Every structure is written in structure tokens, then in C-alpha cells.
Image (spheres, coloured by chain):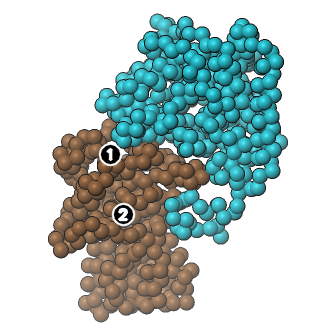
Amino acid sequence: MATTQSQGKRRRSATTPAKNGSDGSPRDVKHPQLDADALIALYDKMVHIRLFEDAAQRGFRQGKVGGYMHVYSGQEAVATGFLDTFHEGDYVITAYRDHAHVLLLGSEPKAVMAELYGKGTGLVKGKGGSMHLFDVVNGFYGGYGIVGGHIPLGVGLAFGQAYQKTGGITQLYLGDGAIHNGAFHEAANLAGLWGRDGLNPCLFVLENNQYGMGTSVERATANTDLGKKFESYGIEHTKVDGMDVEAVLQVAHEAADRVRETGKPFAVEALTYRIMPHGAADFLEKYRTKEEVKKWRQRDPIGLLEKRLEDEGVDESRIAEIRASAKATMDAAVKFAEESPEPDLAELLTDVYTDDSLVRAAG
Amino acid sequence: MPVITYRDALRSAMAEEMERDERVVLLGEDIGVYGGTHLVTNGLIDQFGPRRVIDTPIAENGFTGAAIGMAMAGMRPIVEMMTWNFSFQAADQIIQNAAKLRYFSGGQVSVPLVIRGPNGGGVQLSAQHTHSLEGFYGHFPGLKVVSPSTPEDVKGMMLAAIRDPDPVIFLEAGALYGTKGEVPEGEYTVDFGKARVAREGNDVTLVGYGRQVPVLLRIAEKLANDKIDAEVIDLRSIRPFDSDTIVESVKKTHRAVVVQEQWRWFSVASEVAAIIQEQAFDELDAPVERVSGAEVPAPYARNLEVAAFPSEQQVIDATRRVLYLGS
């Protein structure tokens, strides 16, 4: 996985976080242009995610990946931009569309793929699957399957960082579907409250991909300006075009710096779109039109970035090279997953309690 | 040994550990400035300040979930449920996150969290404010569930709970907050998964926990007047569970009555009865009796509420049945 940070190559802006336009639309970000090397580094990460998801979907269709699986295709610019701000000691937590986040934080694609395949070499030993990826050493605290349920945890993680003066912040990702859940409202209220005392360095990243499963934002709330929901709890917020990785990068750095400095929460709504179905078993997509998907595909973040690379005069062969290298990585990940052994049956009864002797077997 | 109340024993366990360990914080509704609805945390905000004794809004899902996050981040939070009845609001956090995080993270995360508060009824709070949730929480692997009945145990078990690496559901006997008992001086813990023989006897084994224990001891004295020598076992811990102490007792008495305030179906008493028949079937001289609460939402009127919970007479009658004595 690409681990090169584009941060060093970026020309930092000293402006305050973006304010929304008066109509609530994302501000027209005049971000500083990144140089070709920085763009290539971002492209490399995003292509890795996309090709990982393509491989995962093939595995699902072949029946080698079980359960529920939700891919990130179309949303790559969001996590790629935000996790560019990651410092050691930071925490990241998200819901079940979690493959990209853990890969960007440095988990090996083969360990993530092996988890999807239910193998003992998987990231969480085959105990969690696609929805429960964890890599605590790299700052990734999951991976949760209940919409909204992880949001209070993220606020608590941020409290823990501030209370113990670690200097870290928590990036708390949530989807537009989760914002209507009571857990969000209770947790956001606590974040705003504790933030008044500098005890909540929590960066809320609202990944608005327009649909909570198949229910569009318009069909889920009478107040579709989702950032306003944070306002109720004293949390400042902004919006960004989540398909434009350069825009995301700038807003993300400004937001993360601000959270780090103040100990107060801040929220960014990233407008994005999943170009794939909700879950790998969402076949019909009756809730949206082919035309709509086609329109959004024209704003595919990877396609947009390729145009930028062309503009910067990056040779096509360089792009092909990146894609080939990512493909080779994913082929190797799939091979590793396929060839890995299933979890040892003894693993069934471990990790329930710290003391494994407290667990009873079936029968 | 000093004689103090159940409430004070509980408070001193938390206060002493907070002195020793900066990672320990308290969260809950009106636990600070107000002093706690049941005064368990009274005065602690003066001692430790609002950063460690955190008054929360009335949002159990939010603050319980946040406490889980704090525990994941290396803290040792103690959440007060003003009463366990409100924990249904937080059930998603407790069951879906706290209980399972260690497992679905492949052992990468542990949740050293205590959730405590009064459990059970008896003071006319009616349907929504009266539940005994030991069977409910005891069902879920990943949780530890305890129900101490004496000041000595409540202090030692609270200290064990705070230091436990896994989430602990700490069910206090709300009706016993004011009861007094001897409590050892200094630092001590009472391990989970060890039942206590509260009274030794040879004729019949009476099993209970929480506020049933002093009731069973009273009943045992009455039975003694009829020359029935009852052994009383205080389970103390619902999960992990001490089968051995019960089985040993039944091997001696050959008869058992299990008493609980909660509803009978899928309850702790059902589990105890099953364990006895599995592990001591040949020792039994009579079927195990369960004495439980009436299967109705808790009523308000005093006489109805009294009738909804096991009475001393019902326990005595059950005891006489397992001894094949007329009532």
C-alpha cells in the first residue's frame, strides 16, 4: 500500500476552515495546486483502494467472501484526503464501509483480503470479517456494523486522548444514513459539551454519499443540509466536494489542525457518491437511476485526478505503471487469502474475555 | 472491623481507587453537583472535581458509548445508570459494542468498563422503573455480571470490577443501600465467580443473590424454629458462575430452592436448576424448586407490588415441598 505522505509536497494555506456558501453549497475551494509528485502519491493510494475493492467484489461474487460487504468505490478521495492528516497517536473509527480507511493507515492488503476470505491470517483472525476490521497499532479502532452505534465510541476515544493529554485526535467517520440515528445526536451533544473544555478533539467526517442504503437524503430528513445537525450541538462545520481529492486535502488539513489546536470537535461534510451498490448483494438498485449513476461516474474521483495528472504533464506510462503495480499487489493479496488456512478451531473460544477459561464451547 | 452502609462501602471503593488511579472517572446523570439520586457518589465531585466526576445529559446511549470509547483509549470509566431500567436506552452500546469488541477485533481491543446502579424493585416505582436484569445481561458472552449483597462484598467486588480488563455489569441491590455491615479496613478485592455460603446448614440449600440474600437468612432462622437446618448460598456473581459451591451444597443437603425477584422464564433460577440436575442428579431427593416474581409488569399499589415478588411464605412452602413436609 502506498504510504507516501503527500503532506510534505503540499503548499499549506494559512486560511481558516472553509465556510459554506450562503446557499449551503460547498465553498468554491481555491486550493493551492499540488505538484505532480504529490498528485501521483494520492493517485497511487486511490487506485490501490479501487483495485482492492474490485478484487473483493470478485471474491464475493465467487462465493469466497461471505456475509455482508460494502465497498468504498467512488468515495476514495474522502478517506485519502482526510487520512493524509493522520499523526501517530491519532485514532480513526468508522462504520462498516471500512476497507479504505484501514488500508490507508497501513494495513497490509493481504491481511485485509484474508479477513474478507475468513482466514486465520486475516487482520482480526477471521473473527470480524469485512465490517469489523481493526488495526489498533496503526490507529484504526474499527469497523462497526450497526448504523450510528460507533459514533459515541469515537467521542469517547477523543475524550480519552484529551484527558490523558496524548496530543492525538480522533477522526470519526459516519455516513449520511447515520446522522438520523439517536446515537449520533446524543454523541454529538456530548462532543460539543466536552469540547467547550477542550476535552473533545474529534474530527467528524460526514461521508454524504447521498443514500442510507437505498433511502436518499431527501427521503430521510426534512432538513437536508446535514451540516446543520452539528450546529445544534455547538459544533462548527464546513462542506467539501468529496470527489476532488485536492479540495478534500486542503479542508482536511485545516480542520484537523484546528481540532488538534483547540481540543474542540469540528465537522466536515464531504459530498460524495458510491458508484457501486450499497452492499455487494444490492443487485437491483431500484432506488436510483442508471443515468444518475452515469452522471456521477463522470465525476469519479480517480477519473478527475487522472485529468489533473494529464494537465500536469504526467506521462500515461507512469499512470499505467501505478495501476499495474496496484493490480499486482491485489493479485498477491487474493492469492495469499485463497491459500491461507482457515482459522484454527481453537480460536473460536478465545478473545471473549481476557481470561479464555471463562468461555464454554458449543454442545 | 468498621461497620458501614452498603452505600458508603460502594462509594469508598470508587473513591479509594480514584485516589490511586488517575484513569478512573465517573459518568452519569446527576452524580456530581446533585450528589447522585441514591447518594452513592455524594461528595465525590468536591474531592475529584468535574473533570473526573462527570455530570452527563440524560442520554444513556451517548454516555455509555462514550465510556466504552474512553475504556478503549486506556481509561477506566465507571458509568452510573441512575437505575438499570434506563439501560435499555444503552443496550445497543452494552451488548453490541462493549460485550463484543474484544472478540470482533480479534483481541486487539479490551473494554475495562464498569456500569453500575440499582437493580430490582420494591419501592412502588411501577412498571417502567422496576426490572431485575441479571438474566438479561447474564445471557450475553463478553459481559461479566455481578450482584453483591453485603457491604463487605460490594466494596471488594467494586474494586475487582474497576481493575477487571473486561466490561462488568454491576447490579447493586438498591433496597440494601442503607443496610450496614462489617467492612475490612484497607485494600481488598472479592473475586468474581465465587459464591459465598452465607449460612451453613444440612437439610436444604437455599440459593439467591442481591436483596434476596438477607431475606433468605431471615427465612433460614424461621425454618430453624421448625428444626429445618437450611444452607444459604449467595451467588454474588452471575457470570462467571460458581457451579461448584452449589453442587457441593446439594451433595450435602440433596434439596434446593432457588429464589429470585425476576421473572421465571429464561432466568438465573432456571439456569441454577439446570446445573443442579446436570451435575448432581443422583444426589437429588426432590425436584429443584424455583420461586420467582409474578410474570406481570411491576404494579404500583403497595399490596399488588408485594404480591408480585416472592414472599417469605412462598419460599417456606417451597422448602417444605422439597422436604416432603406438609405446609
The numbered disc on residue B160 is 2
Give the amino acid type for the residue marked by disc 1 in the picture: Leu
| Of the image marks 1 and 2, the number of the one nearer the N terminus | 1
A51 vs A21: above or below: below
> Helix or strand or loop: what does disc 2 sit on?
helix
In this view, the residue in front, B104 or A182, is B104
Q: Is residue A144 visible?
A: no
The numbered disc on residue B27 is 1
B179 vs A226: above or below: below
Q: Are marks 1 and 2 in contact (CB under 8 Å)?
A: no
Residue depicted at 57% across the width and 26% down the height = A84
B291 vs A162: above or below: below
Task: Say which quarter of the image contains residue A39.
Answer: top right
Residue B177, horizontal then vertical, whole percent: 24, 61
Q: Colour of chain A?
A: cyan
Residue B304, horizontal then vertical, whole percent: 31, 61
Q: Is residue A249 visible?
A: yes
Crowdedness of circle 2 by 10 Å Cα count: few (<14), some, many (20+)? some
Which chain is rendered brown in the image?
B
Residue depicted at 60% across the width and 35% down the height = A105
Say which of marks 1 and 2 sits in front.
2
In this view, the residue in front, B77 or A263, is A263
The numbered disc on residue A130 is none
Residue A325, horizontal then vertical, whole percent: 78, 30
Crowdedness of circle 1 by 10 Å Cα count: few (<14), some, many (20+)? many
Q: Report the side of B41 relative to B311 (left or right).
A: left
> Helix or strand or loop: what does disc 1 sit on?
strand
Q: Are marks 1 and 2 on the same chain?
A: yes
Q: Report the side of B65 relative to B79 (left or right).
A: right
Q: Chain of mark 2?
A: B
